[in-house]
Amino acid sequence: MKISESTAPAMQTKEDDYRHKKLRRDLVNSLREKGITDDRVLNALDTIPRHFFLDTAFERQAYEDRAFPIASGQTISQPYTVAFQTQLLQVQKFEKVLEVGTGSTYQSCVLAALGAVVLSVERQRELYDAASRFFFLKRYPAIKRFYGDGYAGLPSYAPFDKVLITAGAPFVPPMLLEQLKPGGIMVAPIGEESLQRMTRIKKGEDGSLKEEDFGTFSFVPMLEGKNNR
Ligand code: SAH
């Protein structure tokens, strides 16, 4: 059994019972202990059944604080990383957020749970199509997904209040900076190798840029172009 087949997002409704909720509460508490302080973010993670995003065989793993393989050789990010990036992004209700790297759609759902309007781009056709069949997304009509190259962003929907890159980018993609509103925030893991520096860029009302560094993380690479397999 190939991982890529076994971990495609489920097409059918799954259960979220008291055991899942308990595992999830424990996970959220562990994230708080690891330094996630934003209660809105922690609550969002508490409302989203992460096991829905993995194959039924991996329910327990869904509530461990680690990344997990999904289709197309990609990963669902570690819960700590999702919480950390989301916290840095300071999402407010009704803000328009561009996400690069839809993957499993877990991060998109976290953003939508915070009340954001999410526009998410994925370059892997297989992942884009799998998400189209994923029952849980019906709960979040504020998520719009696009098959495309995140380096280009979504010019026709710009500008964005927030931009979140969930793959390791070798450099800050200039077109995404352009599509960020004055007063907006971009969060992106930046680095050419397997490790990246978590970077937050704030664009001032005058267009000036201020960069902050939040330490080392490891993401799958942000690749150029689309993959139509
Ligand atoms: N946010 C996802 C994380 C998935 S891992 C989640 O919550 O599951 C990163 C994703 O970025 C992968 O799905 C990968 O295919 C995608 N990606 C990499 N380069 C990209 C690009 N240039 N444009 C859009 N998506 C890209």
Image: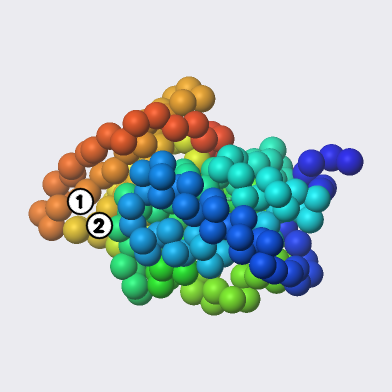
Amino acid at dot 1: Lys
Q: CA distance from mark 1 to mark 2?
A: 5 Å
Q: Which residue is mark 1?
A: 203
Asked whether the residues under the numbered discs 1 and 2 touch, taking CB atoms below 8 Å apart as contact, a structural biologist would say yes
Asked whether the viewer can see residue 74, the reply is yes
Q: Residue at x 46, y 26 (%)?
A: 195
Residue 34 rendering spot, x and y as whole percentages: 41, 41
Q: Residue at x 25, y 57 (%)?
A: 184
Residue 76 rendering spot, x and y as whole percentages: 60, 46
Picture layout, residue 106 above or below residue 142? above
Residue 227 rendering spot, x and y as whole percentages: 66, 44
Q: Which residue is mark 2?
A: 184
| Front-lying residue, 100 or 196 | 196
Picture layout, residue 60 above or below residue 215? below
- As helix, strand or loop, the secondary structure at mark 2 comes to strand
| Front-lying residue, 201 or 21 | 21
Label 2 CB sits under 8 Å from any ligand 1 atom: no
Which colouring convention does the figure follow? rainbow
Amino acid at dot 2: Gly
Q: Residue at x 13, y 57 (%)?
A: 205
Q: Quadrant of the N terminus?
A: top right
Residue 66 rendering spot, x and y as whole percentages: 58, 40
